[in-house]
Structures are given as C-alpha cells and as structure tokens.
Image (spheres, coloured by chain):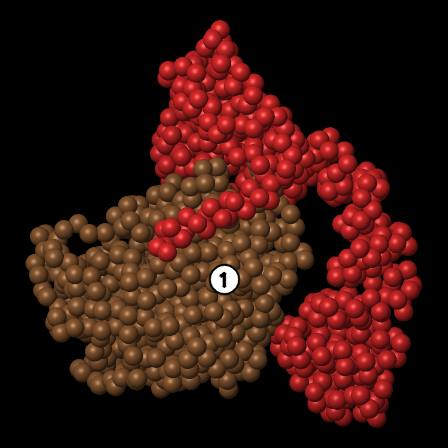
Chain colours: A brown, B red
Amino acid sequence: MIRSSSPVNEFVLRTLQKAVVCSCIALGVAGSSSHLIQKKAGIERSDPYSPVPIFAEVADQFGLDFKHYNGTTGQFYLPEIMGSGAALLDYDNDGDLDVFIVQGSVLDPKKEPGNTLFPWRDSGPPRGRLYRNDLVVGRDGSRKLKFTDVTEKSGIRATGYGMGVAVGDINNDGWPDIYICNLGSNQMFLNNGDGTFSDVTQKTHTDDTRWSTSAAFFDYDRDGWLDLILVNYVDFSVSNSPTCYANTSARDYCGPRAFRPVGNRLFHNKRDGTFEDVTVAAGISKEFGRGLGVVAADFNGDGWIDFYVANDGDPNQLWINQKNGTFKNEALLAGAAVNRDGQAEAGMGVDAGDFDGNGTEDIFVTHLMEETNTLYVNFGNGVFEDRTREANLALPSARFTGFGTLWFDYDNDGWLDLLVTNGAVRLLEDPTRNNDGNPLAQPNQLFHNTGKGSFIDVSKEAGQAFNQLLVGRGATFGDIDNDGDTDVLISNNNGPARLFLNQVGNRNHWLGLRLVGDKVKRDMLGARVEIRIPKEKTLWRRVRTDGGYCSSQDPRVLAGLGASSGVETVRVHWPSGKVEEWKDPPVDRYLTLKEGASPEIK
Amino acid sequence: MNTCLQQLVLVLAFVGMLVIRGDSLHAGPAQSDVLPPPRSGLMPVHQPKLDELEPSVREQLISFQNSLAAQTKDPAATDLKLSEGYGLMGQVYQAYSLTSPARECYLNAHHLAPKDFRWVYLLGNLSQQEGRIEEAVSYYTLARGLRPDYLAALVNLGNLYLQQNRLDESRSSFREALALNAHCAAARYGLGQVALSTRNYAEAVEHLEQALADAPEANRIHYALGMAYRGLGNIEKAQSHLQQQGPVGIRVADPLVDGLQELIRGERLHLVRGRMAFDARRFLEAADEFRKAIAANPASAAARVNLGSALAQTGDVKGAIEQYQQAIRIDPSSGSAHYDLGLLLAKQNQHNQAIVHLQSALGLNPNDVEARFVLAQELLKAGRAEESLAEFSRVVESEPENEEALLEQVKLLFKKHEYKQAIQSLEKANGRFPQKGQTAALLAYLLASSPQYDLRDGKRALALAKAVYQATGLVNHGALVAMALAELGRCGEAAEWQRRMIAAAEREGTRDIVEKLKTDLRRYENSQQCRPLGDISTSPVRD
C-alpha cells in the first residue's frame, strides 16, 4: 500500500502509522535530558533502566525461519563457505522493512540438495526467500513484529547458488528492485508494485555468469537513474577446484589464490529499462582483483560518487569518478589499497562512513584472522591513512575472520559504531579437535565508538545470542521495528539467520530521514545529509543501500542525536549536486525530505 | 529441534565427515585423547586428531607421542629430561600448526625448566601467531630477560608493542635490537613504522631508507616509504616508491622458529609452503620447499611439476624441463606437467615439441581451455594455420569472453577469405560483449572495409567506430571513423577526420602510423577512390 505524503512546514512528513512517535513515553534518565523509551517489538521491559543486552535475538520468535544451505559435499569447494548475504527493503512500500535472504544450492551437478552432507529437507529446491514484515504498532507504542514468507507469491525464483543482493529502484517508479549475485547467472527482479516481481535479467542486460558477490546501485553520472557496479570474485568451477591442505597436512578449503580473479562490471542505466555494459569505456576493466565487497560514496568530496572495491588477497581499488563517465583507480597513492605494512589483505566486507565527524567518508574493511581488520581514515580529498592500531581495532580482530560489517550508531550517541560478523574459512583447530563446535564458527563483534578516534569492544554487552559461535557472513542493518534505533539481521553460513533487535538505541534522541527525489519517489541513494546539532557537532550521513558483505541496507538515514532534543538544520547534498536546507526539524521520528521542497543553498 | 541442538548436530556431522573420509592407514597403536600429567604442577596434553593427516606426518606424530608417553611413565626421568621431551613434542606440534597441544607441551616444559629460554620464547611465538597479543608480550618479555641477546625477541616485542599502539615501548625494543645489530633491517623498519604512527614523516623516511638499504630485496618497504614521502608532500618520490612496492616483506632471522621447519615430514606441507613462497615470488625458497617435498616423496609428480615451475621462474629452464619430464615419467596422466612443459617449450620457441605436450594435456582434459589456447598459438607459429584456426574456434566456442582467441580466429578466417564467417563471429561476440573494445573495433573495420563488398555496412561501422573512439581516444580507432565515413561515401568528412588523426599521431610521435594514415588520406581526398581497400594487415587491433 502506498502511503500519502502531505507537506507540513518545510518538511514532507511521512505518515508512518507503524512508526508511532506521539505515544512514546518520555522519561528522564539520570545524567541526561529526557530520553525516549519505547517498548521493543514484542518484548516487554519492566524496568527500562536495568542493564539489558544491547540486542535481543528474535528471528524464530517472529517467523523468520531461514536456514542457509551451502551444499557441502566434503569436497571442500570454496563457494560452500562464502555465502551469503541479506537485504532489508520495504518492497511493499508499507513503511516497514521486509527481509530478503540469499540462499545457496548444490555445486556438484551430480548431487541433489537432499543428498549432501547436510541434506536439504524442505519441499522445493533451496531458494532465496522474501519475508514480509507485518509490524503492528500499538497505541502505547508497543511493537509486534511478524514475518510472513511471501517468496512464492512474490514470483522471486532465486534458485541459483546465491551470494549477495543489492537493492535499488532501477526504473524510478518508487518501488525497490532486487539484484541477486550468484555463482552463475545473476538475476534482476523488477518490483511490479503489487507484491510481485518479474525477472528482467535478460531484458535489462544485467546478467553475468561468473561468480558475482556484491553489487551496489549508485548514480555515477548524475542523470537521476541508478547505475550498477557488480563485483566478481574468482573463476571457480567444480572441475577446476584443486586439492588444498592446511598446515597440519589435512585437507582443507583452498584460499582464493588457487583461482584466477575475474573482472568487475559497471552497468549504465539507459533510462529505458535496459542497462549498457560500460566496463571498458569507464576504464575499470584493466584493474581488478578477487572482489568481495563494494561501497559507493563520494570519497574525495567533489560531489561525484566514487566506489571502493574490497579484494580478497589483492590490493583494494578506489575508483574516483572523473565526472565524464570514467573512473580512475587512485587507491595506492590515496593510501587505501593495502594496509600500512604494504600488504594486500583478504578484504571481505567493506563500508564507508564518517566515524570521526570530520565530514569525510572513512573506510573499514574486514579481513582474515592473523591479519587485522583495517580502518582507513579519510583526511579529506580522498587521502587516507591506515589508523587501525590507533583506533584499537587491530588487536580485537587478529583472532577472527571478519565478513559482514557496517558503520552504524547502535546507541544513537551520534558516533558511528561498528559490527563485524566473523567466521573462519579454514577449519579451526580447537573445534575440530574437541568435536565441540562448528569448525568454522566464531563470535560476532560489536565496537563502540568513543568519539575520540578509537573504539571499545562491547561484544559482551550485546547479548548471549550475539556471542554464540556461528559462521557469520552477510549482515543487513536497519530499523526493522521503526522504533528509532538500528537492528541487525545476520546471515550465517550453513546456519540460521539471526535477527537482533536493538534494545538500547532509542534511549537517546534520534532523527530518521527518508530522502526522495523531486519527480520520482525513489530513495536518493548517494545523497549526503549534514545534521547540525545545537552546541554540538555536525553529523554527516549518507543515503545508501550498499556496503557490508554481499548485503543491502535500510536506505533511510537514522542519525543518533545523543542527549540533544533538537536539530538546528538538516542540509541535504543531493546526488544531482543541489544543496537544500531544512531548519528545526522535529526529532525522534521519521521524516521524508523531498528534493526541491526547500530553498536551494548556492 | 532447537537451534543450538541443530547446530551441534551439524557440527558433529561435519566433523564426522572428516573422520569418515580419513585414511584407514594407522601407524602405531591407537592413541588416547589425553596424555595425563606425570607429576603435580603439570597439565594434561590433549592429543590432536590425526585421522586426516598425511600418513607420514601421522606416523611421525605418533612416534613422538609414544616417546613422550614413555618418558612420562619413567619415574627416573629428571625434570630436565622431561622438559626436553615436552618441549620437543611441542615443537613438532607447532611445526604442523597444532597450536593447542603445542601450548600445553610448552607450558609443561616451561614449568619443568623455567630458566630455559626456548620454551617461553616459543610460547610467545605461539601466542603471537594466534593473535593473543598481550600473552605474547608477557612471554617475550620473560624470554628477553632470559636471553637479552636474542634479536628476534626484541624485534617481535617491538612489533607487538606497535600493534598495541604502545609506541614508546615499541621504539625502545627496536632500539635495543639495533644496539645488538646496527643493520637489523626489521628493527629499522619498525622504527620507521613508529614514526609513521606519530606522523613524523621525515624521521620515518630516514629509518625506512636505511631499512631498504639494509634489505633491498624487501620491496614492501617501498610502500611505507611512499606513504612517508606523501606525508612530506613529495608526491613525485611517493609515486616512485609506490611503483616499486611489492610483496616481499621483512623479517628478522629467528633460529628457534625457523628451525621448526626441519621437523616437518611428508610432502603436503612442503607443497603448501612452497606454494606460499611461490605466490610471494620467493622462487628460490619455493624451489627449496618443493625439493623437500620430493625428498619426502620421490614419486610425487605434483612436487616435481611445482619445482619445475619455480625453477622456470628463476631462469633455470633446463632444470625446469628436466623436472617436468620426470613428472611425466612418474605420472603420464599429469595434465599440468604436460601443460607446463608445453608452455615452457613454447616460450623457448620450440614450437613442435610444445605442440606435442599441449596436445597430450588436451588429451587428458579436453576442457582445458588454457591449454587449447596456447596450442592454437603454437600451431599458428609452426605454420599450421588450418589446425590453429580449428583450435582457436574451439576456444571461442567454450570461452566466448576470450577476446584474444576471437581476434586470432577472425584474422585466420580473413586470411582464408572467409569474410562472412569472420564478420558473423565478431557480430556474435559483439552482441554478447558489447563492452569489448577490440572486438567492436575489428568488427567496425571489417564492416567498413571487407574485400567482399556486399558484406560492408558503413552505417553500422560508423556507429561502432565512433563508440570505440569515444571510449579509447586512440588514433587508430579514430582512423576507423574516417574509414567508415569513406565507406559511406562521405569522403570530405573522412579526409577531415583523417587529418585530425594525423595531427594527433604526429603529436604522439608515432611515425609509422602517420605514414599509413597519410596513404589513406590521399585516397579519401581522391573522392573517386574513397572507399577503403580492406586488408587485415592494416586492422586497428594491436597485436
């Protein structure tokens, strides 16, 4: 159901029936001004001040029953341990986030899904699944989540060996479309606006038969239409998969270097329902590695969107938009290709965000155990320095293999924190020896941004389920219960998807923004938002669905305001280059800002 | 089933899979899971699962385990003797990255002989490998107290402090190391990294330049130097160093840890280590590991193929050929031996011999597209054009994205005057991969200049040529536009384009191209003979 928007003052306020903002209970919190406490989805808290875990895991409770299937045969095929991702998107435009989770399949053509080491038991083949969110918000602000599996009805038939997913509105009709990255042919699903999707892969010319992992929608030429950057990994096939050994001499999974890298692909939206492959013309065909993650953002602050590719074992690439349809890889001199030691690391997930509040996009990349995750701090003009150690992010990551990640402000204090999903890619010694755990399983990690350029590992405070050992891969972030804080869905390889509801974020003030176009109602991916808080700092956030590992995010901006109960101005830097400003917006609610609705700032 | 239980079942199944797939060969008696401590203060050693290990490794481990078990049962064994037994067992475990039992052994050895530097140092090393940084610092600190002259302990400590961002302590450790050896490049590099951390770029440059002078082969230093010069604003020098940066890192000699490698038995681990060295372009080291693999298993064809590859990289072609040939003698069905030998012979311009081995490789695996592609090239070089065309066509069929094969196929078709097939092949590829520039360029060229006039399509040639030229800006692609215009009879425009291209070529200083362009220009200026002649040798595709 499409909801109507009505202009109120400078804002276009979205009537979010499910995002109740008026019935919140305003309570004082020691040491701060009035904070908002809301009842979490289906979880009653008798004492809002008692120490509660940051997250509550609720997937099973609300019908999110997805289990990842990787088709393991005992042949140690690399793809088995790489998938998969997930997406949060409002496919039915009803104001709450629905869930799409990518599924694996069998690799060996001689095998059936029911005839593998962990046999597929469900009816029908393994396939990516779409869950509709039927969130109900009570008059008292209580929230009840319920997920309904609508895959069959939606027409999404994603039965390939899935890896990643990207979401963007490719035809500017206001309905988000879905692109699925597979090992084998990819799939573009056009949202018909009636709860169904059509497979338009061939019609749009967006297929790629190689091993695709992540993709990102962004408007690189500022024509108002979303283009697509697709990242590919290696040339794996069952027939070319070599036998590899661990240092123990036992058989193990091969690393990526056992396979040739394959190139990435850039698709330009031709505005007629088709895309043109401009990989060569854009200049990105000459340099590529074994790509796993991609994020698009304006890294050098020139108003044009660039993109960054995280490669597994090869130098990463920072493709700077030359404003003429071409890109130039400037990663090496920019200081963002390799770590401070000059080593190309095993880049998995990647995200960009302004963690230090200087108005530039900093990059965080997750890596293999024995390496560390890496923080590339942007000093402006796209000049980066590896400051992982200084930020206290090196040591906590040395023992884990990181995949999914994102900059997000879990406690709404105005500083971007980090979450990392972990899971090894080589059999871990201890679980194998003791038979007491999944041989690839590792705990997730949550890092709190101190606001002083460093982070603290607060994983222990994130709840028991968060610390459970699983093989974490993709993670998707968004306010799934519309209560003003960011929730997380984690996709685990050969395991259950986990939905972590944020229990603490909306104790602080917040501002939720949906940024839509002038003539089209789609989310304006790539728009940057400058939020000025009185007597405080300025927050820089961007509208995006990309980032992380093989996953797609809530396109809305959710800015934590800390104890500040007001915002001076919200200035939007639209992808078109226009800048507009809104004054004194109400907080602790979601607003829709429409391009062209406010006076332009020259 | 609840989720936790389900996970456990999955895990057990997975581990079970490992066991089921295990070799049935067992060397020696079945081992109990735990070696109990023989006296108080010691800890039990949890034995690793050996089922999946290479038989020779398993035998070795069981032999050491039995020996240690016997020592622990000997009431006359002194603390010193027992500590040696545990220590040696720990070293063997560590050599195979079995870190948990290695740790237990070292802890016992350390308990029995607390003044023995080796066990505490190796505990530090294990902790460092596992990312237990604080633990590693504690052990190394203890080790430094026992042996202040052990250089690697100081450098490792410096690096660990650096990881912890304890810059003053890091600096002190590196300086202590330099006091022991003024040319310790690893310590000098560490000081450079400390300086980079504090953004003292001038000091960083000083240390890093010295480190590079002490270890010029360590090309990864160039990266840090590049960043330091960038910090100083010297972009030219920064770029110069960044261009020289590579994968070879710097490490301090560590006799104790390096010696663990001597304990490795069997073929597999040497293959793994050799492969790692090969990937890091340390070919001599790789060759050494592959030789050890051969020593462990002289009948290993894989080890010989890998040794051949490493030798080829070091320039020892004769040695490489010998290894490949031996591999083929051991295992005539080794496709990679035939392929690699064929490739090497091809590089030596021994085309006919190369063809024999490449055909053998394809006989073993007809789906080996790489081998087929090289075979096609070799057949062409050997003057066997017809066979070459057949092979290139097969490559294009199974790997449509292989543009190089397509271009060769088209050229051969063209030489055979099979213009229609050439254009059809290009059209098919262009339809599938419109982004491939050389395909589009060659198609434009043939559509503008095919000797078979009825195949020409000037309009389409012009559209293709313009798109390619727009993307590349290359003179020869610009000349294609002129050629297409000429085919359309737009001779004046063609001449105008050609003049622009001639001017561009003159600016670039490409004389040979200028002459060719001028020849064509004369034809365009003579509107009676404006249409292109069509000659594959003048194709815009560069070899």
Element on which disc 1 rests = loop
Which quadrant holds the C terminus of chain A?
Answer: bottom left
Residue at image coords 44%, 62%: A85
Residue at image coords 84%, 54%: B360
Q: How many residues crowd mark 1 within 10 Å: few (<14), some (14–19), many (20+)?
A: many
In the image, residue A149 above or below residue A313: below
Front residue (pair B473, A348): A348
Q: Would residue B137 be visible to someone looking at this image? A: yes
Q: Where residue B508 sits: x, y (%)?
A: 70, 67
Q: Would residue A221 be visible to someone looking at this image? A: no
Callout 1, which amino acid?
Answer: Trp
Front residue (pair B37, A53): B37
Give the quarter of the image for residue B543. bottom right
Q: Where residue B76 sits: x, y (%)?
A: 49, 6
Circle 1 is placed at which residue position? Answer: A120
Q: Where residue B127 sits: x, y (%)?
A: 43, 31
